[in-house]
Image: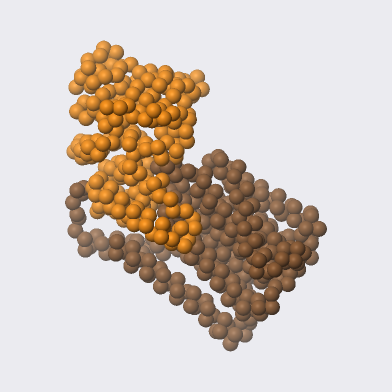
Amino acid sequence: MSVILEVDGVTKRFGGLVAVNKVDFAVEEGSILGLIGPNGAGKSTLFNLIGGTIKPDEGRIRLDGKDVTGWPAHRVAREGVGRTFQTTALFEELPVYLNLAIGYRMRTKTNLFDALLRTPRARREQKEITQRVIEVLTFVGLGEYFDRPAGSIPQEAQKRLAIGIALMGRPRLLLLDEPTGGVGPEETGRIIDLIRRVRELGITVCIIEHKMKMVMGLVDRLVVLNFGVKIADGPPQEVCSDPSVIEAYLGECIA
Amino acid sequence: MKWIKEKLNFNLLVGLASLTLAALLPLLLQRTSGGKYNMIVLTYAMIWAVAACSLNLILGFTGQACLAHGALVGIGAYSMAIMVERVGINYWLAFPLTCLLTAFIGFLIGLPSFRTRGPYFAIVTLCFNVIVYATFENWTWLSGGLAGQSFEVPPVLASRTTKYYFVLAFLALTVVVVRQIIKSIVGASFLSILSNESLSEAVGISAFRNKLLSFTVSCFLAGMAGALFATVSGRVDYSITSFLHSFNILVYTLIGGVATIAGPVIGAVGLYYLLDRIKGFGEFRYVGFGVLLILIIIFFPRGLMGGINQLRDWVKEKRSTKVAPQGEVGS
């Protein structure tokens, strides 16, 4: 197994606050990594650093050995990093199918003139987009909502759509920021099932999650952050019996 | 996707019907008293409709408020008049050159101002409009001052009727261009920036490049509106670059329906014609303008066309909840 993502001594400061402090970890290709920690531990900041939304002050981030530190978000995405956001981010006014189609934009080459003149390339890619949309629509199970505005479908369906958008461009690495946040227990099961199926496609997954039970059964490895510092890293059972983790979680971690 | 086809065909039908109506209108108008005058008013209205469609591309479909469309139309008009009258370039060559020049100016404005997010673009374009107006007002050697720059159109375009059809053709072209873009994946990228800029960056879309592209095309069309204005009026003075025009184009777009394809056309033609009919009220007309704008923004945030679409969706929903049984969620 090769390492797909390498976070090497990454630090991010906001004013006097060190949100992420010299964090190191590596993710193996095809695995699911869980990222946990109390509120404000720097988990989402770390995702933003990997995804290129913000730039680290120190340290390197490597994708498949390629240094992508400080790259803008759209270039990181093109390298094969798909992501979802903590507060579900969708193109809310646009229909579900268009949300997905936009996710595939980076894999198409249609330019303005192709669009204006409906060139063979534009038509070919349009077909390709439609095909991919149907594929992903089926995969995430949102067929019945395909023409509804994304903001109007149920919360849990929105979460699946967000994952669907990220899957459109065939990422190698998927960053999921609380994919089951604000979703009931029964529906949580459906999302976990989806994440497992994503892994079966060979996509590496990093997941931020608060629901410990869910994380324990899902991930191959667990990284624990507290106040921006990595305090534990290893197989989930091992990490959970770590005294410093139990302390950070006030004992909540004993799953 | 059968329903897409149905919807498209319906819109296409309405579009073709309106075009036919607009094409037949001069025949009707010739029979009425004051018909010639109304035809000129409608010709100008259609020019502003081109400008409104152009604004709609960057404002409505890409979400970047440009407050310089008056200046851009003015630059187009001046470029046309000066190229033909002073430089001696052939009219038919000057026309596309004008569009390209305006597009290039737009590109130059966009280059620094799209580097940042937020209201900076609106501020930059507003300042640009003020600068352009001040420049044309003071550099009389360039603008010809109040007398302006007169301009001779080719004999083919001399009559009112041919001018009407000429402008109508370009308006139809503009609508088709905007539609082709918006229905394509390129337009979808624009829409994604309007809807959620962070997410579109996260799916590999460069907001900077797409805003720049959208604005450059928008300016190309604004330049075209300017070239048409010079053609129809036969004289350009610096008042064309006034902020008042930018404001008017904005209001036409907002009232007609921002982010709809037909909205800006309906808004511009309807309002320009209406404003001309109540010319007797002078400056007081704009008070009514303001009230109308407030009402529209409160009740129909997407303008008249948006209101119609809302109504259509509502009817569709009523129908579908009656007929369609609830399907199973998921697969």
Query: Is A111 positioned to the left or the right of B124 in the image?
Result: left
In the drawing, does residue A176 fall left or right of residue B152?
Answer: left
Outermost residue toward the right in this view: B141
Which residue is situated farthest in the top direction here?
A243
Rendering colour (chain B): brown
**Above-or-below relation of B183 to A242:** below
Report x, y in % for residue A74.
44, 40
Query: Can residue B222 be seen from the camera position used here?
Result: yes
Residue depicted at 52% across the width and 81% down the height: B24
Structure colour scheme: by chain
Image-quadrant location for residue A44: top left
Vertical side of A147 occupied by A215: above or below: above
Q: Specify the farthest residue to the bottom.
A: B31
Foreground pick, B319 / A94: A94
Where is residue A9? Give x, y as percent: 42, 19
User: Toward the viewer: A87 or B271?
Assistant: A87
Task: Name the residue at 66% across, 66% down.
Answer: B93
Q: Position of residue A162 (x, y in %)?
A: 33, 42
Give the total of numbered labels: 0
Query: Residue B21: x percent and y percent?
Result: 49, 78
The colour of chain A is: orange
Residue depicted at 56% across the width and 65% down the height = B49
